[in-house]
Image: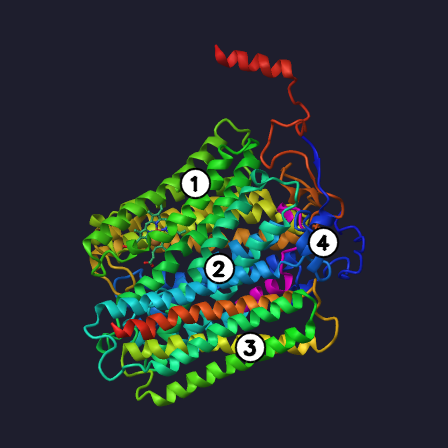
């Protein structure tokens, strides 16, 4: 069997992925979405590690959370609602750009940024209201490191959305067929959202029982 | 035919100079071949430094008294020797170096999927090294490469913190590299190459990358928690605050057991290429080898507690992890048998790569066997943290990974440099290394069985005799580097030109010029056969190939 391979083509445009071709920038095929998903799969293991550690600490403690380090529920619940709804808002932006409506996409993304910032503000407010710090006991350590690490991810998400806004100020940068950056930001934001839901269950709901 | 022929310029894509100059290798560069060489050379420098550290330690251990190095210095050398060898030499050389150099060539692509990410991943290595060497100025980390708390919480906080940052950076590098390999192999594999025509080295890289991707972040978070415990007063690993030191061990080994496969799976891939090529025979059991890599990758994620049999681990866990550990030896054994079967009856050429590959087989089997004994909890409880463990992991890491890296360096040297190395020097290097490795590490089994603990500068005088033998062996190992070093330096500029395919190998990287053109293939590479179809295909390499009648006659002869 002798097959002829055309390497000058496949490096740039894998024959079977026509979808990627339409979105590709320049010579190397655009595999950034797949790359991001792979990265997030890896990143989630980082959260998985600390979540597991937290559950082990919880299972060996007599009272959880230990006395004096109780959490407050009302504000975080509101924050959760804000963050979860922001996932729908950003998705509206994605729908808009798929129809080529750049201005609408910008509006939706701006709204998501505001929601993200409100979430972060709420988080910081909560930190100042709680009467304990990082080094009070292992629960407080977990609490601050887990929420802080997640907050860092939220912050990065906000920066990414601002990047999208900045780039889309120039007409034609994103279009109905070319919007990988917009899409990636959305995927990342959903990831941050999902992590928060797990975190909320672990740190807030589970402390009720 | 030294320089690659001029590149046909692409439709408005990149504009590269025709050939890289020497200084390009010191700069930010996105060509996967440059990055591969950058990885290999920097990793080799770290290998030399770590080797000197080992020689210093062996000198200390020549006598039972700690009379040569201060105890803190010994601990510092011990920690950083392990760290450099694992995180800065074997992993970057095998995955970053050969992975980057070979994968795009083997799959017929121009470059990796994310060339810039690739370059960034490389440059994280020197930056991490700066952190590590900076830590030495603060006395260095001294808690071993495993950095268990509470020891790591109470010894030399500054050095330990810098150590953590170094490992976090290099871990990030390996995550970025892994995702790049996965996307590259999945998306850029030349479409006419079927999955079962993918060279086994690429299969090994798939398995390696999956492991790196899913285990490294767990180490990262464990180290971040340690960093917070040391510097910011958190209590993750402080029992007085409700924390738990064993949690660190779980997080650490969830990464670091798979990490041992990170260090051996690419080597397994190299073995398949080298043995098949130099034995001139199709690889025995292509599918078995490819799938056993994936099996190792999956099962390897569930054996980590075999490092913790003595950490107060409950009996049911010991039992579970003993069983899973013994299971993971099965796919490893499958590969060993496949390589032996490939060698069997082959037209073996005793070139340096093949010598190292065969040496690897011998030593790795030995290390694998001691691994199986360690995997059985009842035995491990007696020898855990003794020199028996040191002997085990040096047989698999030196006898396995380092031998594999040497085999790979000799095998692909003609491709990378365009010149042949000196075969005699290569063989001398092999003999010295083989003798040195066995002399250094074989007696350590005995030391361990007699109860000598690891990680100590002062030991009981009854162990002195065996320790002296080990130290002599290590000196031979130190010397064995010299023929290798001269061979590489000299051959790189003076060796006889190699041509495209000195080994008559069938994988795609041998179809381009040596060294390859900047975007790899200036002509279309042709899959003229499966990657290992030696002696079965229509292509004839040997001038005196027998005719069909002769083969039939020969077979008939054998049947009688
Ligand atoms: C047949 C497969 C293998 C089995 C069953 C096995 C089993 C084990 C066990 C049970 C231990 C723990 C011993 C103890 O601390 O008491 C161990 C340690 C170790 N193994 Fe293996 N092993 C195998 C292959 C490998 C390979 C391929 C490598 C690396 C290339 C490796 C590297 C190590 C290292 C570095 C340690 C020591 C870690 C430390 O405590 O510093 N092993 N092995
Ligand atoms: Cu292990």
Q: Do the residues labelled 4 and 3 touch (CB within 8 Å)?
A: no
Find residue B89 and name its label: 2
At x 29% / y 77%, what residue is drawn?
A139
Closer to the eye: label 2 or 4: 4
Report helix, strand or loop for mark 2: helix
At x 48% / y 61%, what residue is drawn?
A41
* Residue at numbered disc 1: B361
Report the side of B360 relative to A110 (left or right): left
| Relative vertical location of residue A48 with respect to residue B358 in this rendering, above or below | below
* Residue at numbered disc 3: A112
Closer to the eye: label 1 or 3: 3
Closer to the eye: label 3 or 2: 3
Secondary structure mostly seen in magenta is helix
Report helix, strand or loop for mark 1: helix
Beta carbon of the mark 2 residue lies under 8 A of ligand 1: no
Answer yes or no: are tags 2 and 4 on the same subunit: yes
| Residue interval drawn in magenta | B105-125
Q: Are marks 2 and 4 in contact (CB under 8 Å)?
A: no
Q: Which chain carries label 2?
A: B
Answer yes or no: are tags 4 and 1 on the same subunit: yes
Residue B504 drawn at (x, y percent): 64, 36
Q: Do the residues labelled 4 and 1 touch (CB within 8 Å)?
A: no
Q: Residue A51 magenta-drawn?
A: no
Residue A49 appears in the figure: yes
* Residue at numbered disc 4: B519
Between marks 3 and 2, how big is the CA–CA gap? 45 Å
At x 47% / y 72%, what residue is drawn?
A84
């Amino acid at each position: 069997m002798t097959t002829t391979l055309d390497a000058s083509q496949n490096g740039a445009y894998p024959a079977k992925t026509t979808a990627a071709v339409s979105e590709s920038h320049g010579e190397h095929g655009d595999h950034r979405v797949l790359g991001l998903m792979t990265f997030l799969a890896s990143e989630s293991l980082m959260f998985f590690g600390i979540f597991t550690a937290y559950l082990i600490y919880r299972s060996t403690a007599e009272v959880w959370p230990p006395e004096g380090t109780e959490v407050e529920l009302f504000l975080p619940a509101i924050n959760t609602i804000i963050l979860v709804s922001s996932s729908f808002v950003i998705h509206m932006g994605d729908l808009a750009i798929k129809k080529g409506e750049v201005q609408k996409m910008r509006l939706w993304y701006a709204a998501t940024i505001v929601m993200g910032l409100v979430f972060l503000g709420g988080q910081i407010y909560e930190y100042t209201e709680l009467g304990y710090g990082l080094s009070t006991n292992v629960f407080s350590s977990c609490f601050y490191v887990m929420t802080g690490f997640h907050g860092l991810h939220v912050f990065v998400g906000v920066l990414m959305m601002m990047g999208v806004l900045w780039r889309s100020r120039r007409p034609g940068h994103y279009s109905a067929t070319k919007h990988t950056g917009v899409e990636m930001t959305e995927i990342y934001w959903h990831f941050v959202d999902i992590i928060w839901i797990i975190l909320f269950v672990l740190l807030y709901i589970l402390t009720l029982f | 035919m030294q320089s690659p022929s001029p590149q046909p310029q692409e439709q408005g894509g990149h504009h590269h100079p025709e050939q890289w100059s020497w200084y390009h290798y010191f700069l930010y560069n996105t060509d996967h071949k440059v990055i591969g060489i950058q990885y290999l050379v920097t990793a080799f420098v770290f290998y030399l430094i770590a080797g000197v550290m080992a020689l210093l330690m062996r000198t200390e251990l020549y006598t039972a008294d700690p009379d040569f190095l201060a105890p803190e210095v010994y601990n510092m050398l011990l920690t950083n020797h392990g760290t450099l060898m694992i995180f800065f030499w074997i992993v970057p050389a095998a995955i970053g170096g050969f992975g980057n150099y070979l994968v795009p060539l083997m799959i017929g692509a121009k470059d990796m999927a994310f060339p810039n990410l690739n370059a960034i991943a490389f440059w994280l290595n020197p930056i991490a090294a700066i952190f590590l060497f900076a830590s030495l100025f603060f006395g260095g980390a001294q808690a071993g490469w495993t950095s268990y708390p509470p020891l790591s919480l109470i010894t030399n906080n500054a050095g330990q913190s810098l150590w953590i940052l170094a490992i976090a950076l290099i871990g990030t590098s390996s995550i970025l590299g892994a995702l790049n390999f996965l996307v590259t192999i999945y998306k850029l594999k030349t479409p006419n190459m079927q999955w079962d025509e993918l060279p086994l080295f690429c299969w090994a890289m798939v398995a390696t990358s999956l492991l790196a991707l899913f285990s490294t972040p767990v180490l990262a978070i464990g180290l971040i928690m340690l960093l917070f415990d040391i510097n910011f007063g958190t209590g993750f690993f402080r029992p007085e605050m409700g924390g738990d030191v064993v949690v660190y061990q779980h997080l650490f080994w969830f990464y670091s057991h798979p990490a041992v496969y990170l260090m051996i799976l690419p080597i397994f891939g190299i073995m398949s290429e080298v043995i098949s090529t130099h034995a001139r025979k199709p690889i025995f059991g292509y599918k078995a080898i490819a799938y056993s890599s994936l099996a190792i990758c999956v099962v390897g994620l569930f054996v980590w507690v075999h490092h913790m049999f003595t950490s107060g681990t409950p009996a049911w866990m010991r039992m579970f992890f003993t069983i899973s550990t013994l299971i993971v030896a099965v796919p490893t054994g499958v590969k060993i048998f496949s390589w032996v079967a490939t060698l069997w009856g082959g037209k073996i050429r005793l070139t340096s790569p093949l010598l190292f590959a065969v040496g690897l087989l011998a030593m790795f089997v030995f290390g694998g066997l001691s691994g199986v004994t360690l995997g059985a909890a009842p035995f491990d409880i007696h020898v855990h943290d003794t020199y028996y463990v040191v002997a085990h992991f040096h047989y698999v890491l030196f006898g396995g990974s380092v031998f594999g890296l040497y085999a790979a360096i000799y095998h692909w040297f003609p491709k990378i440099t365009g010149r042949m190395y000196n075969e005699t020097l290569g063989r001398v290097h092999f003999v010295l290394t083989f003798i040195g490795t066995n002399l250094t590490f074989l007696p350590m089994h005995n030391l361990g069985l007699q109860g000598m603990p690891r990680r100590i500068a002062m030991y009981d005088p009854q162990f002195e005799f065996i320790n002296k033998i080990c130290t002599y062996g290590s000196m031979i190992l130190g010397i064995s580097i010299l023929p290798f070093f001269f061979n590489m330096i000299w051959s790189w500029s003076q060796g006889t030109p190699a041509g495209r395919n000195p080994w008559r190998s069938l994988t795609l990287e041998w179809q381009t010029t040596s060294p390859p053109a900047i975007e790899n293939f200036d002509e279309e590479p042709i899959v003229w056969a499966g990657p290992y179809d030696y002696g079965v295909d229509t292509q004839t390499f040997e001038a005196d190939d027998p005719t069909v009648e002769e083969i039939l006659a020969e077979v008939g002869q054998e049947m009688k």
